[in-house]
Amino acid sequence: AQSVTQPDIHITVSEGASLELRCNYSYGATPYLFWYVQSPGQGLQLLLKYFSGDTLVQGIKGFEAEFKRSQSSFNLRKPSVHWSDAAEYFCAVGATGRRALTFGSGTRLQVQP
Amino acid sequence: DTGVSQDPRHKITKRGQNVTFRCDPISEHNRLYWYRQTLGQGPEFLTYFQNEAQLEKSRLLSDRFSAERPKGSFSTLEIQRTEQGDSAMYLCASSLGGTDLNQPQHFGDGTRLSIL
């Protein structure tokens, strides 16, 4: 069965600083990988996805993520964080033949002025 | 663009009562999913429909839980004899059909259930 680990429960960055959120997955084959963002009391919004091809994927709101098979990682990055990026970020993995996504436990991002 | 709609947004009930939640997916989406999210955790998969057929159920979906999607459009999730441990956010998502997961899931804002 697949699993996802987000090692950082909480991260604080200053506005304008760069950001990297870590995600490690466990899955035997090539995974489908996603990053979602959730604001308090809201549902999840898809930031970006990786299925195959170019390992650097671009998403909405200036986010990007890089798939590294050798490290089983799919880290999310943003060069300059805005105060509105404060939210909870979830990495998720999907497996071939299944419809369910497996989510990590999330990383809460706080942005300091 | 109408997204996934869930009703109610909040539900407070006493232990032992039955509750029902509704999800209206994006209109052209034939796949519908239910997830449960507890505080400090990511969503956990409960069940999945393709059109009106319930094709997959998690072991989390005990016999007190039942989900339906009678006409392949909206779906309901019912919890009977609620327990304290059922307190959570219940999220609905929908997607187009396609090969495996190449159609991403779009989530509603959820129904937050609180059991007194």
Image (cartoon, coloured by chain):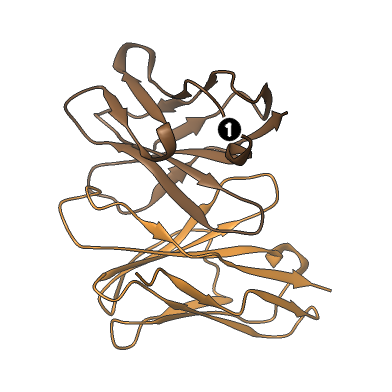
Chain colours: A brown, B orange
Judged from this view, the residue extending furthest toward the right is B116
Please state the horizontal and vertical placement of residue A51, each as a whole percent of the image: 23, 36
Residue found 54% across the figure and 51% down from its top = B43
Quadrant location, the C terminus of chain A:
top right
Residue that numbered label 1 is attached to: A82
Residue A50 x, y percent position in the rendering = 28, 34
State whether residue A34 is above or below residue B50: above
* Residue appearing at x 38%, y 26% in the figure: A65
Residue furthest out toward the top? A70
In this rendering, is residue A54 above or below A35? Answer: above
- Residue B91 at what x, y percent from top left? 52, 63
Q: Quadrant of residue B64?
A: bottom right
Q: Helix, strand, or loop for circle 1?
A: loop
Q: Residues within 10 Å of mark 1 (few under 14, many from 20)?
A: some
- In percent of width and height, residue B19 lies at 64, 83
Which chain does the residue under circle 1 lie in? A
The residue lying toward the viewer, choosing from B114 and B56, is: B114
Query: Relative to residue B85, is residue B9 drawn left or right?
Result: left
Residue visible at 15% across and 51% down in the picture: B99
Q: Nearer the viewer, residue A77 or A103?
A: A77
- Tell me which corner region of the image, top left, top right, bottom left or bottom right, holds residue B110: bottom right
Identify residue type, mark 1: His
Q: Quadrant of the rendered structure where residue B2 is?
A: bottom left
Q: Is residue B108 left or right of residue B18?
A: left
Q: Is residue B111 above or below residue A107?
A: below
Residue ID at (69%, 44%): B40
**Quadrant holding the N terminus of chain A:** top left
